[in-house]
Amino acid sequence: MADQLAVLLDVSNPAAFEGLMRTLTSHDNAVRDPGEAMFNECKKQPDQCTTQLIQVLRSSQHEDARVMCAVLLRKVLTKDVHDDEGNTIWQFLRPETQAGIKGELLKSLLEEPSRSISKKVCDTISEIAAIIYDTTGWPELLPFMFQCIQSQEARHKESALLIFAQLAHCAPHLQPYLGTLHDVLGSSMQPTVVFDVKIAALKATINFILSIENQTDIDRFQDLVPLMLQTLGAALEEDEILAREALEALIELAENNPRFLRAQLAAVLTVMITIAESDKLEDSSRNYAVEFLLTLAQAREKAPGMLRKAPQFVQRLFQALLMFLLDIEDDAAWHTVENDEDEEGMGERYDVGQEGLDRLAIAMGGKTILPLAGQLLPQCLASDDWKMRHAGLIALSQIAEGCAKLIEEQKMLGPISDMCLAKVTDPHPRVRWAAVHAIGQMCTDLGPALQKEQHARILPAILQVMEDHANPRVQAHGSAAVVNFSESCPKEMMMLYCDALITKLIELLQSGKKLVMEGALTALASVADCAQSEFIKYYDTVMPYLKNILMTATEKQHRMLRAKSMECISLVGMAVGKDRFYNDAVEVMDLLMRLQQTEMEDDDPTVSYMLQAWARLCKCLKSAFLPYLPQVMPPLLKSAQLKTDVTVRDVDEVDENEDDEDWETIELGDKRISIRTSVLEEKATACNMLFCYADELKEGFYPYVEEVVQLMVPLLKFYVHEDVRNAAVTALPELLNDAKLALEKGMCAPHHDANWLKAMMDFILVDLCEAVVKEPEVEIVSNMLEALHELIDYGGELLPMDPAKMAQQLTGVAEMFKEILILKKSVQRMEERQARPQEDFDEEELEALNEENEQETDVYDQVRA
């Protein structure tokens, strides 16, 4: 090993090191893995290793080796942490090594033939410069960059602009050069300049606008907006990939400094809406333009109401999004899928249009959007083209949430229901599906007002849809609409239709069609949840079917059917109560325990559904559930203890999880962070179930209190998932109360005395007081303060503690109150802004702001309480 390392790091002979670089590009693990191990050994001698990297980068004839050196040089110099203080290897290199690397990197920009490698070198230069600007500096860099700008070589110009773009965050250091930079950026976007250079200049311009703090300096760049728009337009004609790079940068500008665009808003909006409307451009380019416009519409904090002052553009955007919904085909697979969420035949623009209408309606409000809908949607619904009718219904479902308040105020529930109900009998099944979808979505967004006013028309229509045996997809969606209807339907109203609904749902349970049966199970569960004790009259009819499915749906393709039967049985049990349910509950729980002991695949929905079913059974059976805890708790604790599955990569690395629905990917700076959301959802479900057990079983949960407290307290700061934090917040007071009740009733072990309870209180309070100050979500702050109130209520006599701890906790509480008071002042500042509104502020913006302020005021009220 030592001899091999000496050969690799021999700076007089870079050939061996070049060979190592080439092994790192191999797709064969047997070749690449030993190479990676050897390179890790090389990094332990950083001066020699980085010197070899720069040598091979500069001299190799093999592009794959140069690419690897460019990537590794950046990573080793600026990313790999070399000590406990977070310093990178760069800070530990000898001065002569640093000087050599800086010089060779600049030469590489002038001589490297590959554009992609040059861009990687630019990244490395920028990051080194960012590290040393505040210390040793890099005096040669700026003159070199201005020299490149004057070069006749387009590649040199582009490289300089790429570096300027990345160094924009060092704007204070570049303050003396802003005038020169403005001129350089303007000249670099002239029509005669090549596109690579123009796009680099556009991105650099935006980065400077976003990094400069002085408004006068920012305004200096206003005259570059027309050049930026010209650059975008020209790129769309020549190279849409480059154009999308420009659009991405403009979206960032719209998100972070929308007010900069106000002076030339009409010109900017004209360009963007024209791109969105153009069917000659690629879908991705049009989607980016829509994203820009929606980002501008949603920029309420930084430019409230700005887009609402341009109604003609809002109308064109609404129309464009409506037309995006026509990106749909009647794919035969849509009719036969076994998942109602599958979107066969729906194109990329369809998804953008659907999401965009929702975002636009919420951002603009009903006063802006409803008149547009009233003008355009009836035309769609009257069309001979099924796609237009489908689009009109989907649009209606998407804007309901944003327009809900005005729809109710203007008594439009009837006319809107008319639009949907008229299409429940449409000749095309896709349109019938869309009509049912719109009805269901509006039941969610406009309920309970819609249910109270229109139930006599809506439920018979849904029942009619559930007769559509020739179209299982439509039939199953009728069951989904029952779920939406039930969520905010008064019990007495639901009972008017229970006979017909349950008869029909039992019929669907016997259809033999998996999708239809799954939908019927969910609908039955929601009806039972709504009807509560009134459901007892249907219990004997329904339960045998449910148990039969639970016992017989054992094939892999029926896993979701079995899982939904668990959900339905447990909700029916909760509805009818312990006395009626008990005998069946024992049989079901024995079956669940046997099922729990079987090996399940990672993607099996049974685990999550079973956790929730156990919790409902606990709520129903109360203390009768206690004998099952020893079997239920181990897998539940295992799920609650799941570690976050996170991968962090450079943005230019291939992300194997990018298209996996179980993973969510975000970009943060130059890193791509992927989080396995399915793991987080299981963890959140488990934590909520633990709260349920603690809340329902009281002192009966004592054997698990200590372990669960130890698990939950660290989760107060589990910032990856807010549902997990919220579960921990709500569970901890109940856990303390369980322990207190057990102690009072003499159920505790001898060593679990008053001191043990006091130590538990201390442990919870310290972390809760720390967490509330750092908590980013207003609603969770409110819940934390409520938890603090409950803890004091349950264990107030435990509060006295040693002076050091008392001081520590009081300091935490004081800081917490300080943060909340700052929040209150923020609300007051908003009120002052209402008194002296900005130029774009309007009545709808005032209404939206008042709704947001209500939540913050709730938090302040918690403090005062």
Image (tube, helix red, strand yellow):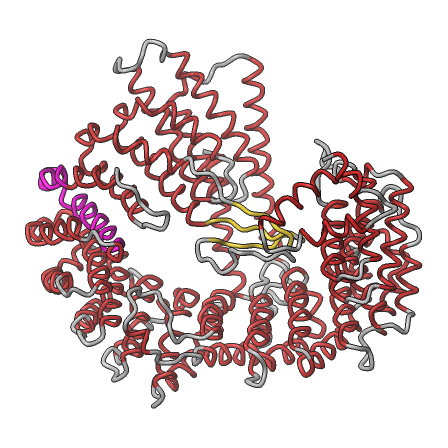
Quadrant that contains the N terminus: top right
Quarter of the rendering containing residue 95: top right
* Most foreground residue, 819 or 153: 153
Residue 704 horizontal/vertical position (percent): 33, 25
Locate residue 823 relative to residue 139 in the image: left or right: left
Q: How many marks?
A: 0
Relative to 34, does residue 230 appear above or below in the rendering? below
Name the residue located 25 percent from the left edge and 15 percent from the top edge.
745
Q: Is residue 668 above or below residue 612?
A: below
Name the one closer to the observer, 154 or 802.
Answer: 154
Query: What's the magenta region?
Result: 559-587
Q: Quadrant of the C terminus?
A: top left
Q: Is residue 627 above or below residue 724?
A: above
Does the magenta segment cover residue 606? no
Position of residue 340 measured from the top left corner of the image (x, y, whole percent):
31, 65
> Residue 787 lies in what quarter of the image?
top left
Asked if residue 212 is positioned above or below residue 322 in the image, the reply reads above
Q: What is the residue that sits farthest to the front in this orientation?
A: 3
| Res 42 visible | yes
Indicate whether residue 574 is drawn in magenta.
yes
Task: Between residue 667 and residue 790, name the one nearer to us.
Answer: 667
In the picture as drawn, the residue positioned furthest to the top comes out as 750
User: What residue is at 51 percent from the left and 68 percent from the top?
Assistant: 364
Question: Residue 31: percent from the left, percent from the top?
Answer: 62, 49
